Image (tube, rainbow, N blue to C red):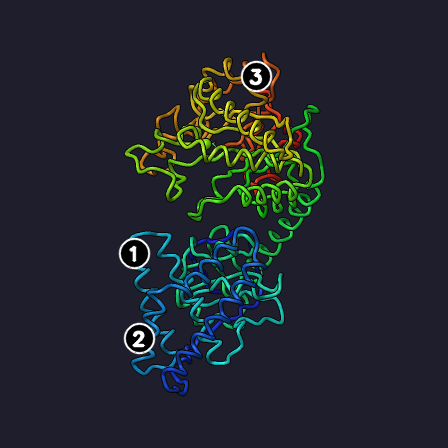
Amino acid sequence: MLHITGTAASAGLAVGTVKRIYRASTGLTRVVLDFPREKALFEAAVLLAKDELAELEQRAGAQDKDIFLFQRVMLDDQGLLREINQAITEGLGGAAAVEKAAEIYSQRMRSIDNEYLRERASDILDACQRVVNILDGRPRDILKLDQPAIIASDEIYPSDLVSVEKGLILGIVTSAGSSQGHAAIISRTMGIPAIVQAGEKFLQLCDGETAALDGFSGELFLNPDEPTKARFLHRIRLKERQEHKLEKLKKARCVTPTGQEVSLMANCSCPEDIELAMSKGADGVGLLRSEFMLMAGKMLTEQEQYEFYVNCLKAAGGKPVTVRTFDIGADKEVEGISHTEDNPALGLRGIRLCLARKDLLETQLSALFRAAKYGNLKIMFPMIATAEELKLALAVVEQVKAQLRQKNISFTENIPIGTMIETPAAALLAEQLAPLCSFFSIGTNDLTQYAHAADRVNPLVADYYPTFSPAVNMLIEMTLRAAEKNGIPVSVCGESAANSALAQHYVSMGIHTLSMAAVSLLEVKEFLMEEPEE
Ligand code: PEP
Ligand code: MG
């Protein structure tokens, strides 16, 4: 038995036969045509590869679509294409030119001082490998499995994973790779246990052998002895039982042992996220981060936004969808809209930016009011600090409604409008804000950042950004008192709602709607429904 510790990249356990994937590069051996024909062949192969990537993008889950989109965009990258064309002109065959350029380009990416870009190097290799395969007439889906296996290679590419039938990949081991790479991200989305950085020794010995893989700890056993194998199989059975239990929980209403019903909503950013949330039994969308639709750097027209919201409402199938108006600024930069500021978290962000750029807010609200008839829509404003700001935002609402009336455009008159409580000022002034709106939604991410003066994205002050804060708790209590006095509901939509213990704490405080990432819904539901131990 060989025991290796790599880096855990996707949680889960697997025991099975290992299939090693060899990636020989054969582009170098092809017969080379004259270079105009070689270029034409190369261009046709790129077109075909882009079609295939578009298809993979369609098939991929919501979180993974971007990966194939990125690969497709890379195949249009002028720098890369120039490099390939240059190599062909110098006499290389199309496939060899692609391999050479891909290597140069990915090496260049790997040396960039930016982790995200470094991780994208393997996407370039993956996309280029697709083009090489087409040029060489090799089967496009390199990975073919006829029975379940743990797959091992120097690196696994995203397209390896989505091209194999579900359930056939038991686990993934790579000798190199990284836990932030896209293959690791996809394996997490697909629930396939994975270990990266397992080293060369494993790779050399593994093909056809049995392995036990622990994607929680990063441990790997090649040819495990009987007790190790039995231990793994026992843990896998326990996990399956747990998953079965969670599956049943999807349909159950969340009721605490004391009989309190709790609505568990999801934080989403697009219709695909909402579909995923619905499949996990979400009671609705407690926070739709609408600014994410602009992050591709393109401003959407009112009609495009309208269609986006209609799709969101339809995906929720009649369950409530709370759309937060654009919270642009700070860590959510939008090219052409957000400003470069010395202190962006305290800058022109959220409602402040929308009040400075009323055209943005007007367009968004108009699209929302028109789309509302397709579902159960609520709207809320981010980063409110004073009653004056809320009044100004509400005045824009009335103005948009008046314009729609004037133009005889059909829209829903009465949409509940709420305020996010995510600045300490909003919590302190909650008594003034409550009579002006229909609900409060507490954004604990920012409320903690501003209450503790600790930048939420700065790792240097991570220790100053507490998970539970008595100070934030006092601000929440104030918010609750003001809401109760004015008869409006309060929810929590910050990350803290996904922490089961904190979720339980919020429920005990009287907050009966919690919104969180879809992946946490069932775990929190199970915890809230559990009888306390004696
Ligand atoms: C929050 O601040 O808690 C919140 C939910 O908003 P965001 O994380 O999008 O700033
Ligand atoms: Mg916030």
* Vertical relation: 258 (above or below) 321: above
Q: For the residue carrying disc 1, how many other residues have a C-alpha within 10 Å: few (<14), some (14-19), or many (20+)?
A: few
Image-quadrant location for residue 512? top right
Residue 83 x, y percent position in the rendering: 32, 71
Q: From mark 3 to mark 2, how far is it between C-alphas?
A: 67 Å
Q: Rate crowding at label 3 as few (under 14), some (14 to 19) or many (20 or more) other CA atoms within 10 Å.
A: many
Q: Is 469 located above or below residue 140 in the figure?
A: above
Name the residue that disc number 1 marks. Answer: 112
Res. 483 mark: 3
Which badge, 3 or 1, is on the more N-terminal residue?
A: 1
Crowd tier of the residue under label 2, counting other residues whose Cα lies within 10 Å: few below 14, some 14–19, many 20 or above: some
Secondary structure at badge 2 equals: helix
Front position in the image: 26 or 247? 26
Q: Amino acid at mark 3?
A: Ala
Q: CA distance from mark 3 to mark 1?
A: 50 Å
At label 2, the amino acid type is Gln
- Measured from the top left, where is residue 157 in percent x and y? 47, 64
Residue 358 lies left or right of residue 528; in this view the side is: left
Badge 1 element: loop
Relative to residue 423, is residue 225 drawn left or right?
right
Residue 189 visible at all: yes
Label 3: state its secondary structure: helix
Residue 75 on image: x %, y % = 42, 65
* Label placed on residue 86: 2
* Amino acid type, mark 1: Ile
* Residue 267 picture quarter: top right
Looking at the image, which is closer to me, 194 or 78?
A: 78
